[in-house]
Image: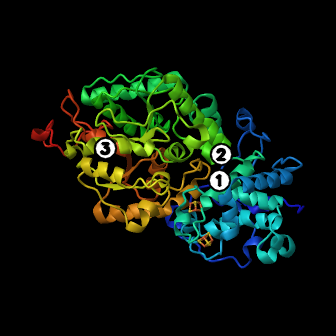
Amino acid sequence: MIPSRLPQERIKTVADNLPKPEELSQIDLSMPDTGWMDTPAIFRKGIYCHAARARDIEALGMPNPRDWRVEDDDWKLPHNWQDVIMDGLRERLEKFRSLRIFMDTCVRCGACADKCHFFIGSGDPKNMPVLRAELLRSVYRHNFTRAGKIMGKMVGARGLSETVLKEWWYYFFQCTECRRCSLFCPYGIDTAEITIIARELLNLLGLNIDWISSPVAKCHHVGNHIGMEPQAMKESIDFLCNDIEEITGIEIKPSFNRKGAEILFVTSSGDYYSEPGIFTCMGYLMLFHQLGLDYTWSTYAAEGGNFGYFTSHEAAKLLNAKIYAEAKRLGVKYILGGECGHMWRVLNQYMDTMNGPPDFLETPVSPVTGTRFENATSTKAVHICEFTADLIKKTKLKFDTKRNDHIKLTYHDSCNVARGMGMLEEPRYIIKKVCNNFYEMPEETIRERTFCCGSGAGLHAGEDMELRMRGGFARANAVRHVRDKHGVNMLACICAIDRAAFPTLMEYWAPEVGVTGIHELLANAMIMDGQKERTQDIRGEDLPNLEPEDKGANNV
Ligand code: SF4
Ligand code: SF4
C-alpha cells in the first residue's frame, strides 16, 4: 500500500471569489513540466463541491456514512478502503464488458483531448478525457494486468494511494458525463461510462458530493429532488394554473394521483418549482388542457430527474422504480415525459431493463392523432417533444406565431437527449412552427457535437461556480456568436438542468440572453379554445410586438 495524504498547502483558495469573465477567459494551455503521474492535483476552491453528508448516505442505505470535509487531510476512510475499491472494480470488470474494453483499448491517440468543455475552459490536462480515464485505467493496469504488475509506471500503471483516490474524486466530479469526447474517439471509448463507474467506486466509500446525495435522499423519501411535500407540489402547480387563468382567461384543473387516467405525466421538479422551468410547466398545462388529455400528475413519482444516475446504477434504479410502481398503481396506459435531459436517458435507455418489463402498460398511442409510438414499445414512455411534434404534423394545434416575434431564438441540444439518444429534429420542428426568428449556433457546437452546459451530472452547485463557468465557456461562446451576429436574445433547451444552469451562465458570459423551454414558446403562440385576448406572454410580460389592431388576431 502506498501511504498518502492531501497536504493543506495543496488546497488553494484562489477562487474564493469568482474571477471576472475577462480573467477567466485567459486560459493557460501550457503543459506542466512534470509527467501527469508526478503532477499532483491542486484542490482549488470554486472547482469542487461540498462533501456528501452522513445523514443522506445513511438515508439511502449506502455504505460508509460519515461527515467529512474535502479540505481536511483525513477523509475518515474505513481501514480496508483499498480492498473495498479493488473488490468493487473487480466486480464491475466482470459485470460490464464495456468497462473491460474501455480499460484495454485506448491507444492514446489524443483525438478526444481537446473535445471536453472542462479542458477547453480550464486548460487543466487532467480534464482531457484521455487523462481523466487514465486516472482509473492506471490503477486497473497496476492491479489487473500482467504488464502493469511487472513494469509499473513504464506501462502507465500505478497503485492506489490516498492521493490517487482524492485525485479520482476531484476529477471524476469534474465530468458531466456528457459523452462529447466519445463522439470523436475512433474506438468509441465512452469516458462518461468510465466516470459513472469511478463514481460508483467512490460511493462505496461514502465519497459522494452533497449536491447529488442530498437530492437523491430527498427523492427517495419524499418523491422529488427538492424535498417538496405532496401538498406543496400540488399548490405550486395550482399557482401556475392561476397565472394561466390571468393570462388566458382559461381555468385549468389538473388532476393528481388519479387512478384510471390514461397517461401518467412525469417531469423534473425544476419544472414546477423555479424559474424559468415553471414557464415550461405552464406550457405543458396549457397544451394538455387544450387537447383535453386524460392525464394525471403523481405526487409520489414527482421527479423525472434521477440524480441516482450520477451516483450508481443501484441508486438510479431505486429512484426510477417509483415511476413504474406509480404507473402500475394508478392503472395508466403509458408514461409521458417532460422536457428533461438525463431523465429521458434513464427512461429511454435504462428503465426497461432496470425495473421492467412494464407488461402492465401499453405501447403509447396519441389519443389526439392516433399515432402509435412504436419506438416506445419497450419502455412505454414517450417524450413530450415527440408527442407535440406529432400533434403539429397532424395539424391539431393552431398558433399565432407573432406572439413570439420579440424573441430571437437559438437552440441548445441537451447532451443526453441529443447526443445520447439522437433526438435532434423534433425540438427544431416545434420551434420552427411556433417561432419566426430562429438562428442555429455554429454547426460544430450543435446536434451530436453540442457543448454541455457545464453543470450537468450533479455539478450544479453554488460552491463550484468557477468550474461551472469554465465548463460552460464553450457553450456560452457559441451563444455569444449568434447574439452578436443575429441579435439572439433567447436560448431554448429541453433539459431542466440546462434551464437551471443557463441563466447564471448567460449572465456571466452572454448578458442579455434569456433562457426558455420549448413548451413555453409553444404556449406563447398556441391559440386556445375560449381564450381571452392575449396581451401578455406566459411570463406575464406585455407582448411588445402586437399593434393594437393585431391584438387577439389568430394567425396560424
Ligand atoms: S464525458 Fe463530457 S465532461 Fe466527461 S470527459 Fe467526456 S467530454 Fe468531458
Ligand atoms: S480518442 Fe479514444 S483512443 Fe484516442 S486517446 Fe481518446 S479515448 Fe484513447
Query: Which of marks 3 and 2 precedes in the sequence?
Result: 2
Image region (quadrant) for ligand 1 = bottom right
Display coloring: rainbow
Q: Which residue is mark 3?
A: 390
Whether label 1 touches label 3, CB < 8 Å? no
Residues packed near mark 3 inside 10 Å, few (<14), some (14 to 19) or many (20 plus):
many
- Residue 267 at x, y = what percent? 47, 37
Q: Secondary structure at mark 3?
A: helix
Image point (47%, 56%), residue name: 508
- Residue 520 at x, y = what percent? 34, 41
Image point (39%, 36%), residue name: 281
Three-letter code, disc 3: Asp
Q: Nearer the viewer, residue 465 or 354?
A: 354
Three-letter code, disc 1: Ile
Q: Which residue is mark 2?
A: 313
Q: How far apart, in angstroms, are the residues tagged by discs 2 and 1?
A: 9 Å
Q: How far apart, in angstroms, are the residues tagged by discs 1 and 3?
A: 34 Å
Whether label 2 touches label 1, CB < 8 Å? yes
Q: Which disc is residue 394 wearing?
A: none
Q: Secondary structure at mark 1?
A: helix
Q: Residue furthest left?
A: 549
Q: Nearer the viewer, residue 453 or 449?
A: 449
Q: As displayed, is residue 98 above or below residue 521?
A: below
Q: Is residue 53 visible?
A: yes
